[in-house]
C-alpha cells in the first residue's frame, strides 16, 4: 500500500544535501514511492499505450547527474528499442560541444513525469529542447491548424490546477489557453532554443504530505487526463510527422560516409608514414655509404676502423702478424737470418735459408667463419730448425712447450744472438686496424686499446675501442668522437681474422 510522502522526504533534495551520500537511503525510499505511483498509472494506461514503460532517475550523486541530486524524477517513456533509435538520430544531429556535455537520458525524450523536489510534488507532460525528435514533431503539430485545434481541446479538458508554461510569461491555466497563446509558445520554441514544452500540476510539500496515501489516486487520475495531450505532442509510430524512418536512414548513411572518409584518411596517413620511413631509411643508408663505404649491416663485409690512438700504436720494430697480399720478396723482407737458424738450415742440405728466415705464418679462420680448422702449413726448413734445436726435444709434454708454440716468427734461438750476450727481445703481434672482424670472446681480460663489442644495452652490436677500465669495473669505450661508460660485463673482445692464406703455400 502506498504510504504517502513525509515532510522529511522533500528535505533530502535541498542544495546542502543534494551532493551528499549520507542521504542516499532516504532518497532511495522516495524513489520507491515514485515508482509505485508510475506502475499504478501504467496499469491504467496499458491498453491504450503499450509502447510506454516506467523509469526513474538516479537517487545517488554520480556523473550522470553531475553529483548533485536536486530532485527525484520518475517517468513514463517509450520502450528501449525506440529510445536507442532516437538517440542515434540525436547523436548524429548534435555538435561536438553537445556530445561532450552528455545530458541524462530522460532529457532526450518526451515524458509523462512525476517529480519530488524541495518545493513539493509535481506531475505533468514535458518535452525539452534537447529531445530533438519530439520537439520537431511538436513544431509540426503546432504549425498544422487542425492538429493545433486538437491540442487546444486536450488542454481545455485538463483539470483546473494544470498550467501551461509559455517562455517569457507567467504560467497560464491550461483550460484558458487560447490559439494566440499557442502561437506565442511556437514563436519562443525555435529549433536552436532552450525552451521546453511543459504542462504540469504541483502540490506544495505540506499539501502533498497531508494527502497521505490518497495522493496515489489523484496522481493516477491526472496522468490519465494528460495522456491524450502527450500522445498528440510526442513522436510515436502512430504520430510520425517528421518521417523518422527516412531521417534515421539518412543519419546512418551520413555516419557510414564519415566512417569511410575516416578510414581513407587513416590509410592515407599510414601510406605517408610508410613512405616517410622508407625515405628516412634510404637517406640513412646513403649517408652511411658516403661516410663509411666499407660499413655494411651484419658485418658481411670489412668495416673500416679508425686509426688507434698513439698509446695503442705498436712499438717500433714490432712485426705485424698478418702478411699482406702484396708482400715483398722473402729474401728482402726477412732481413738477416739468426745464426742458430742459419746453422740449422745449413745442416739440412736441401733447405732454403730464405724460407726458414721468413717464418711461414700459421693461418686460422675464426670460429664459424669457414667451418673446420684448415691444415697448418709448414715448410721443411722450419720443421728442421725445430728438430735440430740442441738441448730441448720437439715435444717435451709440458703445457706451452716450444714444440707446441703456434704463431708467426722464427724459432727461438738456443743461445744469445746479441754480440754482447744480451737476450733478444721477444715481440708479440699487434692488431692491425685494417683487418676484418672475425669474432668475439668473453669480457674477461679486457685491456685498454682492445676492440670491443657491446653485448647489451642501447648500443648492442656496436664496435668501439676500449679506453680505460675503472676500479669499479666501469669501462670507458670510444665510438669515434663519442665516448660512453658501461659495465665491463657488457663488453666482449673482438678478435681480428688474419689475411687469407696465399695460394699454394
Image: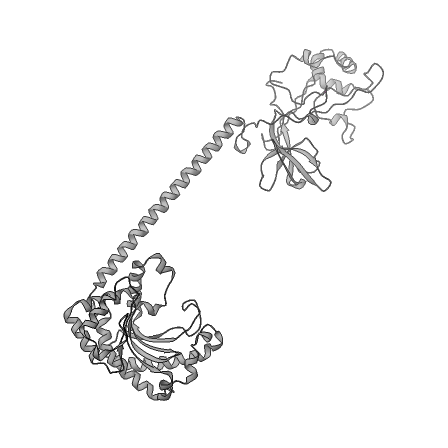
- The percent coordinates of residue 70 (x first, y second) are 41, 74
Q: Quadrant of residue 379?
A: top right
Task: Pick out the residue farthest to the left.
Answer: 146
In the image as oriented, which residue stretches furthest toward the front? Answer: 169
Is 105 located above or below residue 289 in the figure?
A: below
Q: Residue at x 72, y 15 (%)?
A: 357
Give the main secondary structure of the magenta stretch. Answer: loop
Residue 104 image point, x, y percent: 37, 68
Mark yes or no: residue 163 visible: yes
Q: Is residue 152 left or right of residue 60?
A: left
Give the colour scheme of this rendering.
one colour
- Identify the residue at image location x=22%, y=62%: 245
Left or right: where 118 falls relative to 258 = right
- Split into 4 quadrants, where in the image is the N terminus? bottom left
Compared to residue 33, the image places residue 80 above or below, namely: above
Residue 316 is inside the magenta segment:
yes
Image quadrant where one finds the C terminus: top right
Relative to 11, 260 lies left or right: left
Q: Is residue 227 above or below residue 189?
A: below
Q: Give me the residue at 55% from left, 31% from top.
A: 299
Residue 352 visible in the picture: no
User: Residue 433's x, y, as percent?
Assistant: 63, 25
Magenta stretch: includes residue 233: no
Image position, residue 486 (x, y; %)? 65, 40
Give the tally of numbered discs. 0
The residue nearer to you, when weighing 301 against 173, is: 173
The region drawn magenta spans: 313-317
Q: Residue 400's quadrant in the figure? A: top right
Amino acid at each position: 500500500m502506498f504510504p504517502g510522502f513525509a515532510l522529511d522526504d522533500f528535505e533530502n533534495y535541498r542544495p546542502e544535501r543534494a551532493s551528499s551520500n549520507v542521504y542516499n537511503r532516504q532518497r532511495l525510499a522516495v524513489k520507491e514511492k515514485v515508482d509505485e505511483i508510475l506502475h499504478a498509472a501504467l496499469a491504467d494506461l496499458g491498453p491504450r499505450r503499450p509502447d510506454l514503460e516506467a523509469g526513474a532517475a538516479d537517487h545517488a550523486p554520480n556523473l550522470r547527474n553531475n553529483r548533485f541530486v536536486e530532485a527525484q524524477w520518475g517517468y513514463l517513456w517509450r520502450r528501449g528499442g525506440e529510445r536507442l533509435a532516437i538517440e542515434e538520430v540525436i547523436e548524429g544531429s548534435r555538435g561536438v560541444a553537445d556530445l561532450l556535455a552528455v545530458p541524462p537520458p530522460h532529457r532526450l525524450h518526451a515524458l509523462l513525469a512525476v517529480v519530488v523536489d524541495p518545493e513539493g510534488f509535481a506531475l505533468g507532460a514535458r518535452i525539452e529542447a534537447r529531445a530533438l525528435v519530439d520537439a520537431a514533431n511538436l513544431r509540426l503539430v503546432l504549425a498544422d491548424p487542425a492538429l493545433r485545434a486538437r491540442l487546444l481541446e486536450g488542454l481545455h479538458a485538463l483539470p483546473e490546477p494544470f498550467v501551461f508554461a509559455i517562455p517569457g510569461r507567467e504560467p497560464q491555466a491550461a483550460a484558458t489557453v487560447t490559439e494566440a497563446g499557442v502561437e506565442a509558445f511556437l514563436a519562443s520554441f525555435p529549433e536552436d532554443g532552450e525552451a521546453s514544452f511543459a504542462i504540469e500540476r504541483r502540490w506544495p510539500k505540506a499539501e502533498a504530505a497531508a494527502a497521505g496515501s490518497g495522493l496515489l489516486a489523484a496522481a493516477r487520475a491526472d496522468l490519465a487526463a494528460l495522456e491524450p495531450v502527450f500522445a498528440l505532442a510526442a513522436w510515436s509510430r502512430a504520430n510520425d510527422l517528421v518521417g523518422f524512418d527516412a531521417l534515421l536512414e539518412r543519419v546512418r548513411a551520413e555516419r557510414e560516409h564519415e566512417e569511410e572518409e575516416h578510414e581513407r584518411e587513416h590509410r592515407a596517413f599510414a601510406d605517408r608514414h610508410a613512405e616517410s620511413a622508407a625515405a628516412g631509411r634510404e637517406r640513412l643508408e646513403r649517408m652511411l655509404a658516403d661516410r663509411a663505404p666499407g660499413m655494411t649491416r651484419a658485418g658481411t663485409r670489412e668495416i673500416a676502423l679508425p686509426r688507434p690512438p698513439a698509446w695503442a700504436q705498436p712499438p717500433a720494430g714490432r712485426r705485424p702478424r698478418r702478411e699482406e697480399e702484396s708482400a715483398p720478396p722473402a729474401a728482402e723482407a726477412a732481413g738477416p737470418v739468426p745464426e742458430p737458424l742459419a746453422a740449422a738450415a745449413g745442416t739440412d742440405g736441401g733447405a732454403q735459408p730464405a724460407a726458414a728466415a721468413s717464418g711461414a705464418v700459421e693461418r686460422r679462420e675464426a670460429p664459424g667463419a669457414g667451418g673446420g680448422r684448415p691444415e697448418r702449413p709448414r715448410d721443411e726448413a722450419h720443421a728442421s730448425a725445430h728438430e735440430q734445436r740442441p738441448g730441448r726435444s720437439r715435444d717435451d709434454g709440458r703445457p706451452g712447450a716450444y714444440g707446441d708454440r703456434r704463431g708467426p716468427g722464427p724459432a727461438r734461438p738456443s743461445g744469445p744472438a746479441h754480440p754482447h750476450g744480451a737476450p733478444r727481445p721477444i715481440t708479440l703481434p699487434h692488431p692491425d686496424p685494417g683487418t676484418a672482424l672475425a669474432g668475439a670472446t668473453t669480457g674477461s681480460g679486457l685491456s685498454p686499446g682492445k676492440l670491443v663489442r657491446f653485448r647489451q644495452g642501447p648500443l648492442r652490436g656496436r664496435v668501439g675501442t676500449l679506453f680505460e677500465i675503472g676500479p669499479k669495473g666501469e669501462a670507458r669505450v670510444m665510438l669515434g668522437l663519442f665516448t660512453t661508460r658501461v659495465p665491463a660485463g657488457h663488453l666482449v673482445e673482438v678478435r681480428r681474422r688474419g689475411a687469407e692464406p696465399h695460394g699454394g703455400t
